[in-house]
């Protein structure tokens, strides 16, 4: 009898721990998905950078510091990733006219940043994979992440997710 009660309590504690872990992960993803903050902003800068820092703790301060110091002209080094994302964003800009591209961080209201992790080559064709972020600039030295792609994915899929979320924001207005 004692063993059955002990086993039941163990399962109950494990189940409660799994539920609280799911709740914590849900609140972490919700904090990064607030695109409504950029609804009134127009000037966007697209940056592509090969990942040099990966933080296991989930912190973003060092990544934001690197992005703010990064030269936008170097994004063109990663032409395949840049062309995929820029093409999809340009199509969105022509259709909805809610965003315009700028050439420097000083002109930008927010940064669309693709953190390039790797190139996968199915059938010999390189496909850029990474994470897409929207970084809201609050001043020249301060910024914060307001949107993050759900997972590491192909650059085109990440851009599609962003565009779908931007369309949703426009529908709510």
Image: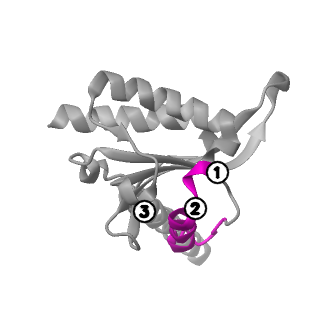
Task: Specify whether 24 is left or right of 172.
Answer: right
Identity of the residue drawn at 28% across and 34% down: 168
User: Residue 41 at what x, y percent from top left?
Assistant: 26, 48
Between disc 2 and disc 3, the foreground one is: 2
| Kind of element beneath mark 1 | helix
The answer to whether residue 63 is magenta is yes
CB contact under 8 Å: marks 2 and 3: no
Which quarter of the image is occupied by the C terminus? top left
User: Residue 75 at what x, y percent from top left?
Assistant: 61, 47
Task: Specify whether 5 is left or right of 129.
Answer: left
Other residues around mark 2 within 10 Å, as few (<14) / some (14–19) / many (≥20): some
Which residue lies under the disc numbered 2?
A: 70
Residue toward you, 132 or 40: 40
Q: Taking 29 as reference, is 144 above or below it? A: below
Task: Specify whether 46 is left or right of 137.
Answer: right
Residue toward you, 83 or 51: 83
User: Residue 83 at what x, y percent from top left?
Assistant: 59, 31
Which residue lies under the disc numbered 3?
A: 28
**Distance of mark 2 from mark 1, alpha carbons?**
8 Å
The answer to whether residue 25 is magenta is no
CB contact under 8 Å: marks 2 and 1: yes
């Amino acid at each position: 009898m004692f063993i059955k009660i002990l086993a039941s309590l163990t399962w109950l504690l494990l189940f409660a721990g799994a539920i609280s872990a799911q709740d914590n992960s849900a609140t972490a993803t919700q904090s990064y998905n607030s695109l409504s903050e950029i609804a009134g902003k127009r000037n966007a800068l697209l940056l592509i950078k090969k990942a040099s820092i990966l933080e296991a703790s989930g912190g973003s301060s060092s990544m934001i510091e690197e992005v703010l110091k990064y030269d936008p002209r170097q994004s063109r080094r990663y032409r395949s990733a840049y062309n995929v994302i820029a093409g999809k964003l340009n199509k969105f800009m022509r259709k909805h006219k809610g965003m315009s591209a700028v050439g420097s961080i000083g002109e930008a209201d927010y940064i669309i940043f693709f953190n390039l992790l790797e190139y996968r080559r199915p059938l010999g064709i390189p496909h850029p994979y990474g994470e897409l972020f929207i970084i809201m600039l609050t001043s020249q030295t301060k910024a914060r992440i307001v949107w993050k792609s759900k997972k590491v994915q192909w650059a085109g899929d990440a851009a599609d997710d962003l565009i779908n979320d931007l369309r949703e924001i426009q529908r709510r207005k």
